[in-house]
């Protein structure tokens, strides 16, 4: 692999084959490990287009990487060059009247929302990783998160995207064509910029937490809260997860409202609660359960899943408003495979928000595989970008 052309165009300090960088970039937050040949940090669309042409000549594949918080190995290289887009991090313009923002892909969501605060606006897609995850990664995975029960997924907030595809062509996509990029986990190209829609920040946030001893009562309360127009988040913690983090060992539901109907009204207390909620997965990981899953179910299937997790004493939490549950396991826990099989049998999806990446390739159905092959023909016929992911 001849890196000299990259060093000439990007600058030597933006190309690395050091053992430290290759080790760091060999994994993402899923803790899956691959093999990273080199890391590059482009700083313009022209440099990304150049990289694509170079990769085609060298017959090497490129892996787009945002913040590396992905939980399914999507940014894990397989003898690939990792393209870290974090240097493309400009907030190019904010239009408060039109509620729009124009950003580069490496902008971190938390940074963007802090910048929008004085305008009374925010991008309301708030995954647990919102302090670190980047806009390009959020679009590529069509991220959900804590307030998706009110605001929907990332795709709802994308007005247009600038993409460099696998032929090095710069494409400006909007409308229906966004479906070729949003949630496609980077297999169709590098998202470099986006125009995003914004929401007004709620003036008020109040929270109620309720504890339950059985799933039926918890699910009945879930249904009651889902009918509340002021509901903005509906989160869940089962009794095994509660016990591990020092809460009363019962099943919990946490509902947030943008009205005064929640029991906890003090803004400081509400902020602290959400901080604790953001720290849930790292805490469970520290307690020996680092492998996190994200099945999504509805109706009787959801009730089956909650019961199954309880019977097997598997700690779990999640965005119950959407039916997305995060069971957490130790490495190599054989029950993960049983979980996937059961979720399929109960009519659910093995991934509600984290994506397929490398981790869940075996669970992609033939129709979806065919769709990825079709998109590859259009956007990346030489299979240069995220080769082998999602298929
Ligand atoms: C503690 C924790 C909590 C989390 N909570 C949630 C949650 O509540 N909801 C949720 O949905 N997810 C959650 N996640 C998962 C993760 O944060 C999201 O998937 C996020 O969208 C990934 O963003 P990233 O910038 O880190 O992307 P990366 O991990 O770098 O990449 C993810 C995928 O997107 C591709 N990609 C990245 N940038 C680009 C780009 N510019 N162009 C093309 N493709 C690109 C990569 O190739 C890869 O396939 C959580 C993760 C952690 C560690």
Image (cartoon, rainbow, N blue to C red):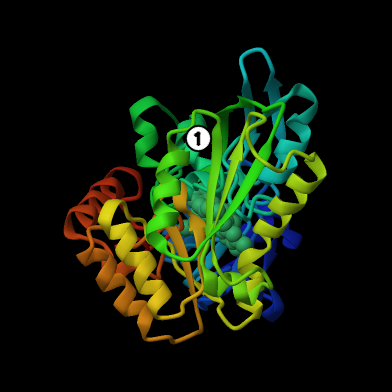
Q: Quadrant of the C terminus?
A: bottom left
Q: In which quarter of the image is residue 195?
A: top right
Q: Is residue 301 left or right of residue 83?
A: left
Q: Residue at x 49, y 28 (%)?
A: 229
Coordinates of residue 98 in the picture (x, y in percent): 61, 14
Query: Is residue 133 in sight in this rendering?
Result: yes
Q: Residue at x 54, y 35 (%)?
A: 231
Q: Which residue is drawn at 66% across and 72% down?
A: 245
Reading the image, the residue beneath label 1 is 150
Rate crowding at label 1 as few (under 14), some (14 to 19) or many (20 or more) other CA atoms within 10 Å. some
Query: Is residue 4 in sight in this rendering?
Result: no
Q: In this view, does 297 lie to the left or right of 186?
A: left
Where disc 1 sits, the SS reads helix
Q: Is residue 173 above or below residue 81?
A: above
Query: Which sits in the foreground, 38 or 256?
Result: 256
Q: Is residue 250 above or below residue 228?
A: below
Coordinates of residue 163 in the picture (x, y in percent): 48, 39
Coordinates of residue 371 in the picture (x, y in percent): 23, 49
- Residue that extends furthest to the top in the rendered view of this protein: 97
Q: Which residue is drawn at 71% across and 37% down?
A: 113
The quadrant where ligand 1 appears is: bottom right
Coordinates of residue 4 in the picture (x, y in percent): 63, 64
């Amino acid at each position: 692999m001849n890196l000299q052309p990259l060093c000439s165009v990007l600058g030597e300090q933006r190309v690395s084959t050091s053992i430290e960088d290759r080790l760091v970039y060999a994994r993402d937050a899923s803790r899956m490990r691959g093999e990273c040949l080199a890391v590059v940090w482009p700083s313009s669309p022209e440099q990304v287009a150049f990289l694509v042409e170079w990769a085609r000549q060298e017959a090497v594949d490129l892996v787009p990487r945002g913040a590396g918080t992905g939980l399914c190995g999507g940014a894990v290289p397989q003898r690939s060059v990792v393209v870290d887009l974090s240097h493309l991090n400009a907030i190019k313009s904010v239009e408060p009247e039109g509620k729009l923002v124009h950003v580069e892909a490496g902008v971190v969501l938390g940074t963007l929302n802090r910048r929008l605060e004085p305008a009374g606006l925010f991008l309301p897609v708030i995954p647990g990783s919102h302090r670190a995850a980047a806009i390009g990664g959020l679009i590529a995975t069509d991220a959900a998160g804590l307030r998706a029960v009110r605001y929907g997924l990332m795709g709802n907030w994308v007005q247009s995207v600038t993409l460099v595809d696998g032929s090095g062509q710069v494409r400006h996509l909007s409308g229906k064509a966004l479906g070729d990029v949003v949630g496609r986990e980077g297999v169709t190209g590098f998202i470099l910029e986006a125009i995003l829609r914004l929401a007004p920040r709620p003036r008020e946030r109040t929270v109620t937490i309720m504890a339950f001893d059985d799933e039926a009562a918890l699910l009945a309360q879930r249904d009651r809260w889902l009918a509340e127009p002021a509901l903005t988040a509906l989160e869940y913690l089962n009794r095994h997860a509660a016990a591990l983090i020092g809460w009363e060992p019962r099943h919990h539901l946490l509902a947030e409202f943008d009205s005064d109907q929640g029991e906890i009204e003090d803004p400081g207390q509400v902020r602290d609660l959400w901080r604790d909620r953001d720290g849930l997965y790292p805490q469970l990981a520290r307690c020996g359960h680092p492998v996190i899953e994200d099945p999504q179910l509805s109706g009787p299937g959801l009730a089956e899943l909650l019961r199954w997790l309880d019977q097997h004493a598997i700690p779990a939490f999640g965005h119950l408003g959407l039916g997305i549950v995060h069971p957490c396991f130790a490495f190599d826990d054989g029950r993960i495979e049983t979980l996937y099989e059961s979720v399929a049998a109960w009519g659910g999806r093995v991934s509600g928000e984290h994506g397929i990446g490398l981790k869940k390739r075996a669970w992609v159905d033939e129709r979806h595989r065919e769709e990825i092959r079709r998109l590859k023909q259009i956007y990346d016929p030489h299979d240069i970008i995220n080769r082998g992911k999602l298929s």
